[in-house]
Every structure is written in structure tokens, then in C-alpha cells.
């Protein structure tokens, strides 16, 4: 197809979008709803994923040492743990450090603990970090069996829960999205069918005088593309502005420290581009579905 | 130009329209296709402009094997074939000029070529002064002349006319025939299906008569041979 013909296709395709009126609006609406949900789910999934990775990366094993343990026994325990291949870092945290951390972590309410500074009931502890987060559980269990270990804590509850949540969101999201994408394509292909019917005479003559199928398809391709792209504008605007809002407001609140959203730039630009592309694909696909059978010679 | 060998055509609904057609039509000929309604004339003609495919047999059209051409090649082949119908098939919202130009636009001819060629063919069919009219403002004969202008716009080697005078009164029919003869005189092959006894018996040309899907008569300088 010659390049200059695209001017003609764009003109004809745009005319059809306007002439099909309500059907065009219905198609654009379907694309809008679909892409909005796609955007919300993708944004949610990627952020949960990011959080889970962060939490996982930060998972430490806290080894509480028995109060009765002597200093040389503690050193021995430290050497044993450090000898494990999977262990990357080990630091000692005395019971005074532990109390300080506790008081700081609780903010204003923590001041109450200052009263027991003289009679600290906490244990000395090791903070152990593994090189690979996956080894955390195994190492924690091994350490638990060592002598003079009072208790082992690690974030074993949080990580699997996050991943499970992520999985459900993904299943529901994909199911909804697939259904909606199909609906949007169906509506677009129906809208284009209207155009084809209105233009059957024209198409007949085009075929008769030897216009190629590619040329005949041109305006319908543009029409589908337009419906898809027009449908992606509103979702992009809504998602970008609401993400901006959430991002700026959540970042200010340090209390929910483990929620760290993906940065607005470049995340929202990538998401917008993805939505635009998906809109275009839905539109073009809808066009192909409806035009194919009309062009069989 | 056109060679058919042992051509059969059965439609999906079981109706057999052509029952073994053998024919050869040469470059520059003027051929009438006659026969009763439902005898297979239309199918015969539709095979020639590749609207239908034969069920069996071989068809050669302007050097292409019609049973093997791909859709892309069909488009190219049709640029060498101009088709004229009984009902004109004009686009009602376009002017006479635009109707003819449309046929050249959609095969992506250059704008300058379109401008000169459209006026050329409108001149040939005597409608240069009606270029800005829309089809509804024209008489039947004038509309048919527009459709002929459109058919010859791309310099086809072959003109296929399916009862071009079927909707026209006798006087107008003669003017259409004069144009078709003129086109033929310039070397274009013309194949015309018709029910008009007067035309066939007055302007003597080769006559191919089809009945029940077979050619029953093929005469140079033939007669219509049916009573209506």
C-alpha cells in the first residue's frame, strides 16, 4: 500500500467513527472500562510484588540468646552461625541495644519502657542475614536447634501472605481482564460491521475495479485503531492522576514504613504506554475480526 | 484473451449453472452472450471477472489461470477488466466526476493522472458537461454512460457488460451500443450479455448462445435466435 493513501484512510476512518455515533461511544466506553481495570490491577500487582520483594530482602533472623548463657558460650554460638555458608552477615545486639530499639520503635508510647532500663528483662541477640532470602527459613530452623538459643524470630508470616494475596489478585484480575477485553473487541467489531454494511456498495465497487484487500481494509483499520486509542485516554488520565495523589499522600506518612510504592516516574509512564498499546491492539483486533470475512473473494 | 476448457460450475446449494463450457475469445473481439433467463449467462460472465470460481475445468483470463490466482492477483487482474452492469452500480452521493475518479483512486493512481484521465473518459462518453451532477440528476442512459466511463478509466483490455441496456429505452440503448462499439474499435475486447433481439440482429457480431449450462450455438455474425 502506498504511503499517500493513508491520508485517505485516516479521513474515511474518522468519518465512520463520527457517523456510527452511539455505537462508537459504546465501543470506546467498553475499551475505557476494560483499560481502567487493567490499569488498576496491573498497578496493584506490580506494587504488591515490589513490596513483597522489599520485605523479603529485608527479612532478618533475630536469634534471642538464653539469659543464662556465658560470654564464651555466646562467642561459640556466633562462630557456629557464621560458619554456615548461607549466612551473609551477623551482628550482635546487646540487650541494652534491644531495649533502645524497642523504645525508639514505639515512639512516644515507648517512653514507658524507659522505667525498666535498670532492670532490663530482654535478651542479648544476634541479627542474622542470609545471602539469599530463600534460605532464611532453613537457616532459622537450624539455628533454633543450637544450644543457648532461647528463641528465633523471622518474618515468616508476612512474606507468604503477601505472595498469596498477590496470587489471588492476579487470578481475579486476569479473569476479569480477559472477559472485558473480549467484550470490547466484540463491540468494536460490531461497530465496524455497521460501517461495512453502510459501505457495502462502495466496497463492492472497490473490489470490482481492482482495489487490493489491504487498501479496502485501510479505513477500517484506522477506525478500529481510533476507537481503541480514544478508549485509552480516560484510563490513562485517571490512573496517572490518582496514582500521583496516592503516591504523594502515602509517601508523607512514615508510619506505614513497609509500603513503598513504585516511583511515579517512570512507572506511570510505562503503565500509560502499556494501556495505550493494549487499547490499540483491542481496536485493531476488533477490526480484523469483522473485516476478515467480508473480504473473502 | 479468454479460454475456457470443460468448465463446470455447481453452487453450494446444489444448482448446476454450467455443464461443460469450452470457448475461446480473442483479443479485440465483440461477443454477445444470449440465452433464456437462468441458462447460465450470468455465471459464465461472473467467472470471467473472477466473481466466482469454477467447480472444475480450466479458465485462462488475460494469461492468468483463474483457478490458481491469489486474492492479490485477482485485484491486479481486475484492473485489466472493466465491468458494466444493468443497474449501473454508481455511488449516489458522489458526483459523476467523483464516481469515475473513485475507481482510479482506490487503485492508487496518481492525482494528476486521475484528473486528466477522468475528463478524457467523460469526454468519450459525452458527459463532460455533467461532471458535477450527481447520479440522481441524470437519465438512465447517462448513468450507464458514467458506469462505462468508470469501467474504461483504467484502460482495461476487456470490457464485460451484463445486460447494459436492460433498463434502458431503445433510443438510449443505441447510444450505449455506439459507445461500446467505439471502445471495441480501439482494440478493447467487449463481452456483452443481452436479451435485446434488436441489438443483436442489427449490430452483427459473434453470438454465443447458452442453454442449460452449455453452449448451444457459437456463430460469427450471428442472430439472436429467440422469440421473446
Image (tube, grey):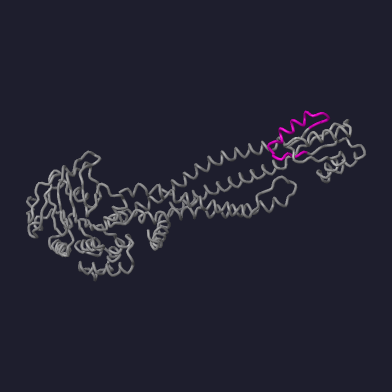
Q: Which residues are magenta?
A: A128-151
- Find the residue positioned furthest to the right: A118
Q: Position of residue B139 (x, y in %)?
A: 21, 63
Q: Is residue A289 left or right of residue A171?
A: left
Q: Decide if residue A63 is on the left or right side of residue B62.
A: right
Residue B172 shows in the view? no
Tell me residue A190's x, y (percent). Answer: 40, 48
Q: Position of residue B38 (x, y in %)?
A: 16, 46
A259 to the left or right of B199: right
- Which quarter of the figure has residue B118? bottom left
Can residue B169 be spotted in the picture?
yes
Relative placement, left or right, of A7 versus A41 is left
Q: How many marks?
A: 0
Check if residue A225 falls in the magenta segment: no
Q: Position of residue A262 (x, y in %)?
A: 65, 50
Q: Nearer the viewer, residue A71 or A96?
A: A71
Q: Where's the N terminus of chain A, which quadrant?
A: bottom left
Amino acid at each position: 500500500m502506498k504511503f499517500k493513501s493513508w491520508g485517505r484512510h485516516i479521513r474515511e476512518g474518522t468519518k465512520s467513527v463520527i457517523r456510527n455515533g452511539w455505537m462508537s461511544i459504546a465501543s470506546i466506553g467498553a475499551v475505557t472500562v476494560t483499560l481502567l481495570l487493567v490499569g488498576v490491577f496491573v498497578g496493584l500487582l506490580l506494587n504488591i510484588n515490589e513490596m513483597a520483594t522489599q520485605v523479603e530482602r529485608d527479612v532478618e533472623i533475630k536469634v534471642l540468646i538464653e539469659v543464662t548463657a556465658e560470654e564464651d558460650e555466646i562467642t561459640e554460638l556466633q562462630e557456629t552461625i557464621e560458619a554456615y555458608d548461607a549466612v551473609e552477615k551477623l551482628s550482635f545486639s546487646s540487650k541494652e541495644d534491644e531495649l533502645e530499639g524497642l523504645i525508639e520503635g514505639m515512639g512516644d508510647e515507648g517512653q514507658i519502657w524507659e522505667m525498666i532500663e535498670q532492670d532490663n528483662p530482654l535478651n542479648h541477640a544476634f541479627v542474622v542475614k542470609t545471602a539469599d532470602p530463600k534460605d532464611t527459613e532453613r537457616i532459622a530452623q537450624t539455628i533454633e536447634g543450637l544450644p543457648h538459643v532461647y528463641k528465633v524470630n523471622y518474618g515468616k508470616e508476612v512474606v507468604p501472605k503477601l505472595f498469596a494475596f498477590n496470587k489471588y489478585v492476579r487470578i481475579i484480575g486476569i479473569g476479569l481482564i480477559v472477559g472485558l477485553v473480549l467484550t470490547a473487541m466484540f463491540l468494536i467489531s460490531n461497530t465496524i460491521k455497521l460501517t461495512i454494511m453502510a459501505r457495502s456498495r462502495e466496497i463492492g465497487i472497490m473490489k470490482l475495479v481492482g482495489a487490493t484487500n489491504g487498501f479496502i481494509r485501510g479505513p477500517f483499520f484506522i477506525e478500529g485503531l481510533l476507537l481503541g486509542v480514544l478508549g485509552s485516554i480516560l484510563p490513562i488520565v485517571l490512573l496517572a492522576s490518582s496514582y500521583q495523589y496516592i503516591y504523594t499522600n502515602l509517601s508523607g506518612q512514615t508510619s506505614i514504613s513497609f509500603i513503598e510504592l513504585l516511583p511515579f516516574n517512570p512507572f506511570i509512564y510505562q503503565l500509560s504506554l502499556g494501556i495505550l498499546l493494549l487499547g490499540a491492539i483491542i481496536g485493531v483486533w476488533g477490526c480484523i475480526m469483522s473485516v476478515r470475512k467480508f473480504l473473502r473473494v | 484473451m479468454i479460454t475456457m476448457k470443460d468448465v463446470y460450475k455447481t453452487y453450494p446449494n446444489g444448482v448446476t449453472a454450467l455443464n461443460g463450457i469450452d470457448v475461446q475469445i480473442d483479443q479485440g473481439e465483440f461477443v454477445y452472450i444470449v440465452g433464456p433467463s437462468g441458462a447460465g449467462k450470468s455465471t459464465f460472465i461472473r467467472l470471467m471477472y473472477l466473481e466466482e470460481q469454477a467447480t472444475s475445468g480450466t479458465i485462462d483470463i488475460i494469461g492468468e489461470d483463474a483457478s490458481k490466482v491469489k486474492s492479490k492477483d485477482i485485484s491486479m487482474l481486475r484492473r485489466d477488466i472493466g465491468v458494466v452492469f444493468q443497474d449501473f452500480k454508481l455511488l449516489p452521493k458522489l458526483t459523476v466526476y467523483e464516481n469515475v475518479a473513485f475507481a482510479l483512486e482506490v487503485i492508487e493512481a496518481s492525482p494528476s493522472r486521475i484528473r486528466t484521465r477522468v475528463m478524457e473518459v467523460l469526454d468519450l462518453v459525452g458527459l463532460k458537461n455533467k461532471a458535477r451532477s450527481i447520479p440522481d440528476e441524470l437519465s438512465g442512459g447517462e448513468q450507464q454512460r458514467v458506469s462505462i466511463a468508470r469501467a474504461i478509466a483504467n484502460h482495461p483490455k476487456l470490457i464485460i457488460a451484463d445486460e447494459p441496456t436492460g433498463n434502458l429505452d431503445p433510443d438510449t440503448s443505441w447510444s450505449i451500443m455506439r459507445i461500446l462499439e467505439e471502445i471495441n474499435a480501439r482494440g478493447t475486447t467487449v463481452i456483452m450479455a443481452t436479451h435485446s433481439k434488436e441489438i443483436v440482429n442489427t449490430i452483427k457480431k459473434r453470438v454465443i448462445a447458452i442453454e442449460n449450462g452449455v453452449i448451444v450455438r457459437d456463430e460469427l455474425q450471428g442472430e439472436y435466435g429467440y422469440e421473446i
